[in-house]
């Protein structure tokens, strides 16, 4: 069975139950996720004992706002539309990733998953060599890409195929406002002689990025270039902590098959879909082992 056959076999009642959107679960998850960032940040700022050990957990908590941004552009974490929009913009702000641009990038990825020349995620080739893997995991190409996107958008260079002409004004405006905000924050920090934001935001973000790179690589890495979502996407089984911080997006085949399902309903969809899953891994460690095994020296 392919993903289309699976969806057509779901009853109307099941569809309605799975796609029901609520504000409550999203607000609770957001409160805990945001609480972690604030708590770790405060401990680092105050210089509490062993605060250095919190830099990586803080980075993971911040960088995995990407999964919330990812969900928010689908308008699924919350029932209230403006909540989704605000959460997307704030998450994008912390990640130096403009949310409006990302929305169209990501929707094109869903529409053309694993289709060469159409899926924008494939514009950057997945690493095939050991050196390429190290570069990829470092996050450096990602940061270069983010700042390149910001600068191009701000100058009005919105020519990617997946960007509709009607969205150009909004994309340009958002990128310019982001650059202005970052510039004001930097000037304020220099004026005050404060390094607080470096320690509670920038450095943790850099340290956390490799964990997000591994997580994202497992979504489609080593999967074939075919249209069937059951065959081009992977679900990775993991612990509750990872599922929490990633907003259940480790159920990735489930999400790609039925992107209208909110994060809190994905475990329920997984139970229904599990017999049809073609690519799964018991853990991200297991996936990394298989991925690195097929890397070449050159």
Image: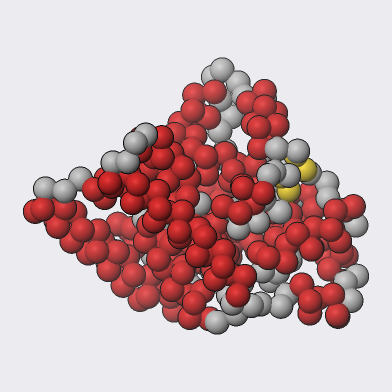
Residue 129: x, y in percent?
56, 25
- When asked about the image quadrant of residue 262, the answer is bottom right
Q: Residue at x 51, y 74 (%)?
A: 84
The image shows residue 44, relative to residue 88, as above or below, that is above
Point out the image quarter for the C terminus: top right
Q: Which colour assignment does the render follow?
A: secondary structure
Q: Residue at x 61, y 54 (%)?
A: 244
- When asked about the image quadrant of residue 166, the answer is bottom left
Point out the image quarter for the N terminus: bottom right
The one of 219 and 228 positioned closer to us in this rendering: 219
Residue 112: x, y in percent?
65, 59
- The answer to whether residue 156 shows anywhere in this view is no
- Would you say 128 lies left or right of 150 here? right
- When asked about the image quadrant of residue 11, the answer is bottom right
Number of dots carrying numbers: 0
The one of 45 and 193 positioned closer to us in this rendering: 45
The image shows residue 82, relative to residue 69, as above or below, that is below
Direction top: furthest residue: 297
Direction left: furthest residue: 191
Residue 82: x, y in percent?
48, 81
Residue 147: x, y in percent?
33, 51
- Would you say 256 lies left or right of 127 here? right
Q: Residue at x 86, y 80 (%)?
A: 12
- The answer to whether residue 26 shows anywhere in this view is yes
The one of 99 and 223 positioned closer to us in this rendering: 99
The one of 62 and 225 positioned closer to us in this rendering: 62
- Would you say 45 lies left or right of 191 here? right
Direction front: furthest residue: 49
Q: Residue at x 59, y 43 (%)?
A: 215
């Amino acid at each position: 069975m392919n993903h289309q056959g699976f969806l057509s076999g779901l009853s109307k009642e099941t569809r309605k139950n799975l796609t029901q959107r609520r504000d409550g679960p999203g607000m609770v998850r957001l409160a805990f996720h945001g609480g972690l960032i604030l708590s770790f940040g405060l401990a680092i700022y105050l210089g509490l004992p062993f605060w250095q050990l919190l830099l990586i957990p803080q980075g993971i908590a911040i960088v995995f706002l990407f999964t919330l941004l990812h969900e928010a552009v689908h308008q699924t974490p919350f029932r209230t539309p403006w909540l989704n929009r605000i959460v997307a913009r704030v998450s994008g702000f912390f990640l130096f990733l403009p949310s409006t641009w990302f929305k169209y990038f990501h929707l094109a990825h869903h529409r053309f998953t694993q289709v060469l020349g159409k899926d924008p995620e494939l514009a950057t080739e997945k690493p095939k060599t050991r050196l390429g893997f190290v570069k990829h995991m470092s996050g450096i190409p990602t940061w270069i890409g983010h700042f390149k996107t910001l600068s191009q958008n701000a100058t009005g260079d919105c020519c990617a195929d997946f960007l509709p002409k009607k969205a150009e004004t909004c994309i340009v405006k958002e990128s310019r406002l982001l650059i202005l905000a970052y510039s004001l924050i930097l000037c304020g920090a220099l004026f005050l002689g404060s390094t607080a934001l470096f320690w509670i935001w920038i450095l943790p973000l850099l340290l956390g990025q490799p964990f997000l790179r591994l997580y994202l690589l497992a979504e489609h890495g080593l999967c074939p270039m075919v249209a069937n979502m059951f065959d081009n996407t992977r679900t990775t089984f993991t612990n509750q902590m990872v599922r929490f911080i990633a907003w259940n997006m480790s159920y990735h085949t489930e999400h790609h098959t039925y992107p209208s399902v909110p994060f809190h309903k994905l475990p329920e969809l997984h139970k229904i879909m599990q017999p049809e899953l073609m690519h799964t891994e018991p853990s991200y460690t297991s996936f990394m082992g298989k991925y690195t095994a097929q890397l070449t020296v050159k």
